[in-house]
Structures are given as structure tokens and as C-alpha cells.
Amino acid sequence: METTRLEPFIIDTFKELHSCPELSYEEFGTTAKIKSILQKENIEVLDLPLKTGLVAKIGNEESPVVALRADIDALPIDEETNLPYASKTPGKMHACGHDFHTAALLGAALSLKSTEDKLKGGVLLVFQPAEEDAGGALKIVGTNALKDAKVIYGLHTSPLYPVGTLGISPGPVMAAVDRFTVTFVGKGCHAAHPDEGADVIPLVSEFVLALQTIVSRNSNPFAANLVSVTKVSAGNTWNVLPETAEIEGTVRTLTIEDRKMIKSRFYALAEGLAAAFGAKVKIDWWDGPPPTINDVLWTNFVEHIAEKEGFIVEAATPSLGGEDFSEYQAKIPGVYIKVGTGETYPHHTSKFVADPAALLPAANLLAHLARETLRGIK
């Protein structure tokens, strides 16, 4: 499709997607729209066991294969942007730019299709469900659709950069995301007779404070690690010491080594303090996606192509936010690119806005990366 037609098409698609947000694993309308656009352009949609989301292909998949990824889900947020194309659904909003990612990848798909006969291999287009639920990437990986891919690229809106600027860095750029709940079980008693029980209130208080020593005393002072307790629950009245206390929170790390170390120290502190206070402890731990770590060689390549496309390239500031693009990188070398979409409100807020002016450059970048990558893969 010609640029003069491609840009308005991408912008119109973006606005339509923005106005009709769907949450993780509920992206049926979004998936149907993507599929309709691709099939209209004679782009093959793979037959995969996915309820939402899809993978399509362009070119010759028997030759080298490159993958491009966009996520498609929205967030449970009431939109407050006053945009003419704002969400039509109360309580749902594209507050993280996944509508932008989807429209940009569709633009890249149409561009690549128009020169399909000149491609030196195959391009897989990944429209991933449920990034916000941190399970969508694994759904795609589980289909085995990317088994032949040599490299994967993904982009994400960034309100930290103006339009025309990219944030790209080799190494860790997003954190591993783990979640925990800890329940201490002591012995409840009358508050006037604490000696007759095993008080979990000072126990949980000590534990919350002790957790902070993992980052301050067990990890390298230059490392970016975080242990946050976000919920504390114990007791229900003023004159009774409760039998149980519970905390909930998250751990964020940028390296596999620190992730393992913090989990080990976490368990040791919980179990040691519980024993010291004469209580028992139950720990529930959920491993989220690993850290997003950009391949050095392919990151340098992306920077080179981006500069040829006219982008200003800056070193991306690592974030302790999570991103399941890392699930692809666990299987395939990949690069996660932060695309400037205007300096505005942060992601996951009701006033986040992505400037449509950044759409065509993002689509062109993805298409250019695919073409040049296929030329360079042996």
C-alpha cells in the first residue's frame, strides 16, 4: 500500500481500536478486525489453537524467518482523555498503547505484503493477547508458530520521548515480575495476656522491615532490584491478638541471578523469623515473566536501521515494570524498542495519550527491520 494511503489507514485503524478496548483474553472483536484486515490483503492467518490473538505470515517461511510482535489487550481503567475517539466502554481503556502497537504492525504488514516477492525469507506477524495478564506470550509460544524465527522485534509506546525518538539499549530493559503472599500463623489470645499466645503482629512487622535488607544488604548497590509489600492484613478488633497475619506484594529484578538470590533470601527470612516467634509460615510465590533482555548484536542492528529511518536514538532507561516480550526472548534473540509517542501522562493512567503522528514512522521501522534482517540472516 502506498504511503499516501497507508498513513490515514493506520490512523483510522488506531482510533477505531482505541474506541473499542477489550481486556485480556476478551479481545474477540479486536482479533476479528485484525483478521479481516489481513485476509482482505491476502495475508495468510495461521490456523492455531488461540481463542484470541493470531499469527499471520508473509513471504517464504522456508527461508530465514523474522517475527514482529504487537500486543492487543486493554486495561480496566475509565478513560479521561476527552479524545473524540475515546473508549466507548466504561471501565475499559487502551491506557498502555496496545492499540498503537496493533495499528503499527498492521501498517508494517501491508507494507511488507506490497513487496512480498522481494522478501528474502518469511515474516511472522504476532498479534498477542493478554500482555497485561502476563500469560499471552506463553499462549503464542505454546503454539510452536515461532519455531523457525531467528529474531523477534517488538515495540512499545513511551510517554518519556517525543515523536521521532526511540529508546533502545542492549541488555536488561524491563524487569522480571514475581508476586508473593505470606501467611504467618501464630496463636491468638486476649490482648491483655500476650504471653498466652504467639503474636503475629510484631512478627509480620519485623518481616516487612527485614525484607528491605535484601536489596540494601544482599544485592549489589548498583543493581536495580525491588521488594514491595503492597498489602498487610491482620486482626479484626482492638482487644484480641489475631492468630494469622498476611502480606502481599511484588519482587522486581533485572537479572536472572538477582531473581534467584532474592527469592532464596525471602524464604530464609520468612521461615527464620517465623521460627523465632514460635509461629508457622505459608508462602505462595508466583513466577511472572523473566526480565526483558535485549540481544546486543541485534540491538546494534536496530539502532543502525532506526537512524537510517530518521529516528533520534537514545539509550532506553531500564524499567522495573514487567513485559512478557521476555517470554519470546527466552526462545529467540530479540529487541524491545521504546517508541516516543509524545511526552504525556504515564502508562496505566486514565489520561495516557499516544500521538497518532508516531504511527507511520513506527510501521515503517518494523517493515524496514524485517526486510533488512532477512537480507542479513544466513
Image (cartoon, rainbow, N blue to C red):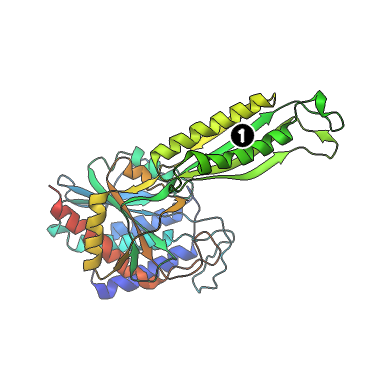
Badge 1: how crowded within 10 Å, few (<14), some, or many (20+)? many
Query: Can residue 120 be seen in this snapshot?
Result: no
Say which residue label 1 marks: 182
Depth check, front residue: 333 or 59: 333
- Per the image, label 1 sits on a secondary structure element best described as strand
Depth check, front residue: 189 or 82: 189
Query: Can residue 195 be seen in this snapshot?
Result: yes
> What residue is shown at x 37% (from left), y 43% (from top)?
327
| Residue 329 % position (x, y) | 32, 44
Left/right of residue 216 with respect to residue 290 in the rendered view: right
Q: Indicate the quadrant where residue 8 lies.
A: bottom left
| Residue 43 % position (x, y) | 25, 55
Q: Given the current orientation, which residue lies at the most extreme bottom position? A: 4
> What residue is shown at x 56% (from left), y 38% (from top)?
180
Q: Indicate the quadrant where residue 284 lies.
A: top right
Total residue callouts: 1
Left/right of residue 271 with respect to residue 340 in the rendered view: right
| Residue 72 % position (x, y) | 42, 55
| Residue 44 % position (x, y) | 26, 52
Quadrant holding the N terminus: bottom left
User: What's the amino acid at mark 1?
Assistant: Val
Depth check, front residue: 314 or 38: 314
> What residue is shown at x 56% (from left), y 61% (from top)?
89
Task: Tell me if residue 345 comes above or below residue 179 in the rendering.
Answer: below
